[in-house]
């Protein structure tokens, strides 16, 4: 399913260097075949209350190098399952970035210092604009490479390949 | 303009004139999963309307992260993976065979290969001149189905290493130092290419250690040229015919050049809770530790156990420290027994775990208690990594780990000999 062009929700702020071990710790590896159970631990080692507070549509807003560490795609998956509509970060680790796009989860590079916890945000994916409704300021986000944009537009890599049968550059 | 190692490999494989920044589609020589990423990969693979594995003999499943299985959920995951391997006729390596990256180096990786694994330390095979990189389950599922993937040709940082390592200083200290220089995101999306006089004197074991941690600076690959050391290693592993000479062009274009003089390096430590928080061992000397873990895809090889055994020979671990050793593979374990390293380590008070990831990711076999500190030869010290967010992990070389096991505190290996 293609992500909506306009996303709306509240900002949950995190610092820099949030690793995949913060997002979904290795000690829960035994739950990886039980995704609803696994998802109950999302962001546990960064903010144990996150899972209770987050609402569908909300944003994770983080500092540098979000998602560094393991290749576990479960990290992107449980964030999506929590209802997060997009991740905004100053920079994103390579494998996590690919995983998030492959899961159809928009991941946008922007100056997140300008956003505070609890701010209401609106993201226009087609126009490339983030509006902080609380502060009434607008931010732009970095361009997503075409191949990734195409994957995102099909709702992820598996639906993309199912539809096209192959990569189309 | 000449080409870097990554540009050479990706040009050759994709049949295009691949330059940094280009996006290419390339066939994959080996694709693999391990037991904690495999089940999701296979479920996703089954969602692709495509039927069978395109290339079973180039597809491998390693049971290494949770072996022997600590609980029934993981046992069921193992069952699921075994059944898939049987139904699809692909390679599977049972628990106890070893860590995926070590087995890939021992059995599969060749210079110029493209290797994709559902594990971030897939970069390890760069030590043998392979373009090897970690990806998530969806990407790997698509390689299962199509035998190829898309790759952005990375810009390259050239890391030139000169000078001789001082005694008890080596590959692990070099890479910890480099990550300190680059920062944990300093090489995101980039290739690290290692070269220089010192490199030709480095064993494959040392090259694998360095390549393994390239990802801790965010790099996509950490890659070494191939040479007679590579050739000898492949011959010993029964793949002498797979050797090919691989060197970057002299006029290749590098985004950044970093020069390291090995003779100036000290034993290094990565301090909790990030890998780029580095310090020479002298600054941490005296820090009390509760556990020492020697093993992992970074430092569980024969040379690593040899280093530890040399320091622990005829000595005992400090009574307040638990010492855990996990060889990286069955081959390593067998050789270490034959030479006598295992006997020395056991006599020194080590617990020997079966070949596999063991205590590295906090699933079992060495989970830390609250407020405990561990000195580990692994590659990551993130909060919660060894099973407890209230614990701390320091990363260092096998020599520093063994020396610290003797004293119960972080210790310069040169101080105990
Ligand atoms: S030893 Fe540790 S870092 Fe290496 S593959 Fe296993 S869990 Fe990952």
Image (cartoon, coloured by chain):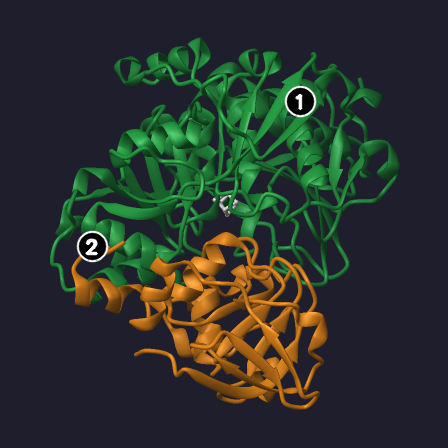
* Chain letter for the green colouring in the rendering: B
Residue occupying image coordinates x 52% and y 81% = A123
Question: In which image quadrant can residue A110 be found?
Answer: bottom right
The dot on residue B84 is: 2
Where residue A125 sits: x, y (%)? 45, 77
Chain designation of label 1: B
- In which quadrant will I find the N terminus of chain A? bottom left
Q: Earlier in the sequence, mark 2 or mark 1?
A: 2
Chain designation of label 2: B
Would you say residue A153 is visible in this rendering? yes
Where residue B280 sits: x, y (%)? 81, 33
Image colour for chain A is orange
Say which element carries label 2: helix
Q: Are marks 2 and 1 in contact (CB under 8 Å)?
A: no
Q: Is residue B265 left or right of residue A104?
A: right
Q: Nearer the viewer, residue B23 or B65?
A: B23
Residue occupying image coordinates x 43% and y 39% = B99
Mark 1 near ligand 1 (CB under 8 Å)? no
- In which quadrant will I find the C terminus of chain A? bottom left
Q: Circle 1 is placed at which residue position?
A: B170
């Amino acid at each position: 399913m293609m992500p909506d062009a306009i996303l709306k929700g509240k900002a949950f702020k995190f610092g820099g260097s949030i690793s995949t071990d913060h997002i979904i710790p290795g000690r829960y590896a035994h739950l990886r075949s039980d995704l609803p159970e696994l998802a109950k631990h999302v962001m546990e080692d960064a903010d144990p209350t996150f899972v209770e507070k987050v609402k569908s549509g909300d944003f994770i807003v983080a500092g540098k190098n979000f998602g560094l560490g393991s290749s576990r795609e479960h990290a992107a998956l449980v964030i999506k399952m929590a209802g997060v509509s997009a991740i905004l970060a100053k920079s994103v680790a390579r494998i996590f970035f690919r995983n998030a796009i492959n899961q159809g989860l928009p991941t946008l590079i922007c100056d997140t210092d300008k956003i505070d916890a609890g701010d209401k945000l609106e993201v226009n994916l087609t126009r490339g604009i983030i509006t902080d409704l609380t502060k009434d300021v607008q931010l732009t986000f970095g361009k997503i490479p075409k191949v990734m944009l195409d994957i995102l537009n099909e709702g992820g890599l598996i639906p993309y390949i199912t539809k096209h049968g192959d990569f189309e550059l | 303009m000449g080409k870097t190692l990554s540009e050479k490999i990706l040009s050759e494989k994709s049949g295009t004139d691949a330059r940094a920044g280009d996006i290419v589609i390339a066939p994959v020589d080996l694709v693999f999963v391990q037991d904690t990423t495999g089940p999701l990969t296979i479920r996703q693979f089954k969602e692709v309307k495509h039927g069978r594995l395109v290339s079973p003999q180039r597809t491998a499943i390693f049971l290494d992260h949770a072996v022997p299985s600590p609980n029934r959920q993981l046992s069921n995951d193992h069952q699921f993976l075994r059944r898939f391997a049987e139904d699809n006729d692909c390679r599977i390596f049972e628990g106890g065979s070893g860590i995926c990256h070590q087995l890939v180096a021992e059995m599969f990786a060749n210079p110029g290969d493209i290797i994709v694994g559902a594990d971030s330390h897939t970069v390890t095979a760069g030590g043998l001149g392979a373009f090897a990189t970690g990806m998530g389950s969806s990407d790997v599922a698509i390689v299962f189905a199509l035998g190829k993937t898309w790759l952005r040709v990375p810009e390259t940082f050239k890391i030139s290493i000169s000078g001789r390592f001082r005694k008890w200083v080596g590959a692990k200290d070099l890479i910890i130092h480099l990550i300190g220089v680059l920062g944990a995101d300093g090489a995101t999306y980039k290739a690290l290419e290692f070269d220089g006089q010192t490199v030709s004197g480095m064993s494959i074991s040392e090259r694998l250690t360095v390549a393994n941690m390239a990802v801790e600076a965010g790099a996509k690959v950490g890659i070494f040229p191939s040479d007679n050391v590579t050739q000898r290693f492949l011959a010993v592993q029964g793949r002498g015919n797979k050797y090919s000479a691989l060197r970057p062009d002299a006029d290749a274009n590098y985004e950044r050049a970093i020069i390291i003089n090995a003779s100036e390096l000290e034993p290094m430590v990565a301090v909790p809770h990030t890998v780029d928080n580095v310090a020479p061992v002298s600054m941490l000397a005296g820090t009390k530790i509760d556990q020492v873990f020697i093993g992992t895809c970074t430092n569980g090889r024969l040379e690593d156990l040899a280093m530890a055994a040399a320091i622990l020979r005829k000595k005992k671990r400090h009574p307040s420290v638990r010492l855990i050793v996990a060889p990286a593979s069955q081959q390593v374990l067998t050789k270490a027994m034959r030479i006598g390293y295992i006997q020395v380590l056991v006599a020194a008070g080590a617990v020997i775990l079966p070949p596999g990831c063991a205590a590295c990711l906090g699933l079992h076999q060495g989970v830390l208690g609250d407020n405990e500190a561990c000195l580990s030869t692994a590659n990551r010290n993130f909060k919660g990594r060894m099973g407890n967010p209230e614990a701390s992990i320091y990363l260092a070389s096998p020599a520093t780990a063994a020396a610290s096991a003797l004293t119960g505190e972080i210790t310069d290996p040169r101080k105990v000999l």
